[in-house]
Amino acid sequence: MQRYINKLPYFFCYLAAFALGMKQLREPDVWWQLLSGRWMLEHGQITRSDVFSYTMAGHPWINVKWLYEIFIALCEKACGPDGVILIQSLVNVAIVYFLLQVLKVLSQRLQQSIPILFSVLSVLLFLGIVEYRMAGRPEMFSHLFSVLFLYFLLKYGDTEWKKLFVLVLLQCLWANMHEGYPVGIVMLGTYAAGSFLSWWLRKDTASAKTLGRAVFIFIAAILVILLNPNGLQLWKQPFEIYRQVWANKYTTELYSFYQPEYWTIEAKCHIVLLCAVVIFWIFKIRNWRSAKNTTAFSPALCSYLLLIPLFAYLSLTANRNIIFSEIVLFPSVAIMMAVISKGIKQKMPEKTNLLIATALAVIFYICIISNAFYKATGSVNRYGIHVSMLHNPLGAAAFLKQYNIKGTAFSDYFISSYLLWDRYPDFRSYIDLRDLDVFPAAFFDDYFDIYAHPARFHELDTKYNFNYVVLSTSQLIPLQRELFWKEGYYMIYADPVSVIFLKQNTGNKPLISNSAIQKPFTWPQPAEDPTWATLLSKLLNPAVSYTDEGEEQAPIYAAEFYNSMQDYPEAIHQLLPQMSRFEDNPRAYNTLAHSYMEYSKVTKEPQLQQLRRDSAMMMLDKAKNVE
């Protein structure tokens, strides 16, 4: 019985890891990846050129993620698109399991016992820091493979080297699932370098043999990458990835440490842990050297120690890479806490240790399923397997389908992914989230130039003859104003996520002239979740609900949209009559204050101008009172 009680904290760690994967589906990338997998299944071939955009149709496309895309497309057939979130949850559990195995192996090597409190605390710190990358992305398998590589290298790197050939097979699989596969090569290369360092320090026969075997496995892993549909191209792909990191100035996840956007709360916590671990190992190595304990420097341990600075550098080059460094740091964090605790002679009774560990894991789990964790960290994620209506253009897609709107569309970088998944082949993108894999950097520059110079859109319109424009309400605001106020296009649909403008031509005249179908602002229907997703979400939290998607918020979103269009009278018209419903909502008061203040700036009559300023100040005061 006691054995099961001792496992209770770990049970809640696994439960928390699983719950962290159960996020509302909001990542736009998942939609084109599902479409790509569906296309490959339907056509019985791998995507080798662009078939989803009209601007780059036929352009070579090195699709490294092809196997992952087929995998999630098969899952979609069985579970719907929500199945991607279930996969993430299962991968999270596997990552935590193997991280604990890594900790067990490393602590045994160092002959250091780890109280359960510190191993649990390390898991919770890890999950809290890396949660933002656990969002149904294909890189989940790069994270899992990284943990597996670390486990195999530490467990078998010194003795049972033949078992390391499993890593060669995993490297082959990795190279066909995600562009993060060079991480595996780096880890095996570091194993070879660590083996050399061990031999240099110890000068023994065993280390020399391990070095030769490590180099052999490293070369085998490089060669096995060739077993992919793109052949030699994947040997060049690591250099292409680094080129994209420097060239792609448009994806926030690629920000490096010298850019302010890098320094999220997760990044700050990571750097604190990284510095602590580095200091810990400096003192540990110094003590070994002073004691002339060369036996401690085994090939596996030397390899692990080399991985810490290498992956630290990787985490500094791009915000998205922090999780790889955290994987390597994980066992060191627990061991460091155990050593410090022993050093200050603060040994806690085993039952107290168990009780605190269980309580922390339970509290963390409750914070996840109640969304308290996400709100505290400022995350946009929310608990529950559910396609988020406020992050995906469900309404725009349904409107296009209902009224059979086709032809060449201009769409923004983010919104096109869902529309491709829902409307292809009737919808093809102008630009989409496949980034520099398909679209040249110059094309990106021209696209983003429209943000500052919306009139450039008309040059593109002359070239491509757009029939309609569909944009995210948060993107290309100057262009939206251009289309909203000037002749040539007519806004026929708007909701919190997307807006549709139809070209004023003969073909669209029946729709434009039909006031019954026009949606100056509407609330789209929420996605209907599969039964299994609803049951699973309620199993972990019976009170789960998606209150943010309630239509009662529509007047606020409508006013914010019309504020962005600089149609302040309409913004006031949308929100002011409904303010009795928002007496305790500072967002509503602030939105209305913005409408009045901006409206006053374009009001010529002095008395009326002052009246609107006074109204704005009154709304701001009310907002402060209810905050």
Image: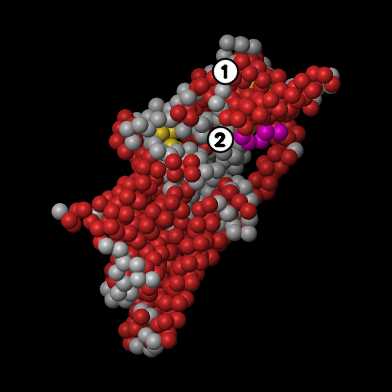
Mark 1 Cα within 10 Å, few/some/many (few <14, many 20+)?
A: few
Q: Find residue 589 and report its image quarter.
A: top right
Front residue of 44/570: it is: 570
Q: Could you say which quadrant of the image residue 81 lies in?
A: top left
Considering only vertical position in the picture, is 123 above or below 367?
Answer: below
Instruction: Identify the residue shown where x is 43% and y is 67%.
Output: 187
Residue 12 in sight: yes
In percent of width and height, residue 572 lies at 67, 20
Residue bearing the label numbered 1: 580
Name the spot of residue 39 as percent of width and height, x first: 44, 39
Can you name the residue that lies furthest to the left here? 1
Label 2 or label 1, whichever lies nearer to me, is 1
Front position in the image: 311 or 448: 311
- The amino acid marked with disc number 2 is Ile
The verdict on residue 218 being magenta is no
- Highlighted range, magenta: 474-478
Up the image or down, 138 lies above or below 389; here it is below
Q: Secondary structure at mark 1?
A: helix
Q: Is residue 462 left or right of residue 437?
A: right
Report which residue position mark 2 lands on. 415
Q: Tell me the quarter of the picture where residue 86 sits.
A: top left
Residue 139 visible in this rendered orientation of the protein = no
